[in-house]
Image (cartoon, rainbow, N blue to C red):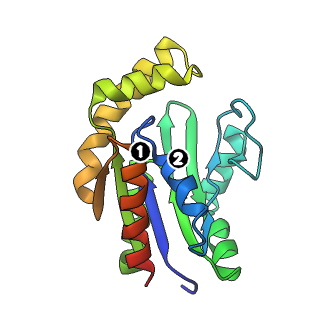
């Protein structure tokens, strides 16, 4: 295992994790974003190889069987997400540290695999009700999808204690600064 360090971010959908990760990437911390693979279709302006590696379900399953994934999960029925081993190697070979934005099971699994080389951070909204408001405010998902995401969030919150650090995002600016301090300390 060569390369730098790994910083893992997990959170229920709508917690602000992606915004916090983007904040960190803009801070000159020698971080490269690990692009996850998924079997779902692109949303909005998402691009293959930029936001995700979009694989059809059969290709995703074939790559699981070949052992190409560091971690993967069937997050919703028939919808897979995972981290390709080749993606982590690509980033390490470029001389950067890796930053992950992954689901909670993936986060726990990556932390287990890399141990002390990895810092795992769970981002939490102040409440499930606040999470619902944020998801509705996005205007990107149907009521049915939001209901599924809320049910999933309630399960995901049970994983929070398995992470090295929990950050409550009740104030985005404060959460970004707190996370930035944490990451800077870890990378020293």
Q: Which residue is label 1 attached to?
A: 172
Q: Confirm whether residue 38 shows in the render.
A: yes
Q: Confirm whether residue 70 shows in the render.
A: no
Q: Is residue 153 toward the left or the right of residue 57 in the image? A: left
Residue 157 quadrant: top left
Residue at the spot 66% in from the left edge and 83% down from the top edge: 95
Residue 28 quadrant: bottom right
Q: Is residue 177 toward the left or the right of residue 85 in the image? A: left
Q: Are marks 1 and 2 in contact (CB under 8 Å)?
A: yes
Q: Which residue is label 2 attached to?
A: 19
Mark on residue 126? Answer: none
Q: Is residue 179 toward the left or the right of residue 67 in the image? A: left
Q: CA distance from mark 1 to mark 2?
A: 9 Å
Q: Quadrant of the N terminus?
A: bottom right
Residue 127, percent from left and from top: 26, 32
Residue at the spot 35% in from the left edge and 43% down from the top edge: 171
Residue 37, percent from left and from top: 64, 50
């Amino acid at each position: 295992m060569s390369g730098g360090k790994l910083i893992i971010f997990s959170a229920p959908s709508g917690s602000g994790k992606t915004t916090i990760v983007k904040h960190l990437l803009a801070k000159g911390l020698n971080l490269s974003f690990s692009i996850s693979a998924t079997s779902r279709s692109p949303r909005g302006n998402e691009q293959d190889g930029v936001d995700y590696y979009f694989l059809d379900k059969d290709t995703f399953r074939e790559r699981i069987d070949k052992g190409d994934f560091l971690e993967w999960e069937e997050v919703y029925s028939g919808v897979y997400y995972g981290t390709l081993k080749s993606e982590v190697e690509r980033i390490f070979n470029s001389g950067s540290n890796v930053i992950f934005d992954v689901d909670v099971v993936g986060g726990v699994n990556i932390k287990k695999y890399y141990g002390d080389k990895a810092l795992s951070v769970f981002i939490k909204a102040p409440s499930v009700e606040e999470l619902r408001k944020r998801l509705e405010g996005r205007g990107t998902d149907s009521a049915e999808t939001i209901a599924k995401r809320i049910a999933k969030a309630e399960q995901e919150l049970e994983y929070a204690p398995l992470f090295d650090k929990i950050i409550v995002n009740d104030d985005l600016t404060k959460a970004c600064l707190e996370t930035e301090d944490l990451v800077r300390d870890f990378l020293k």
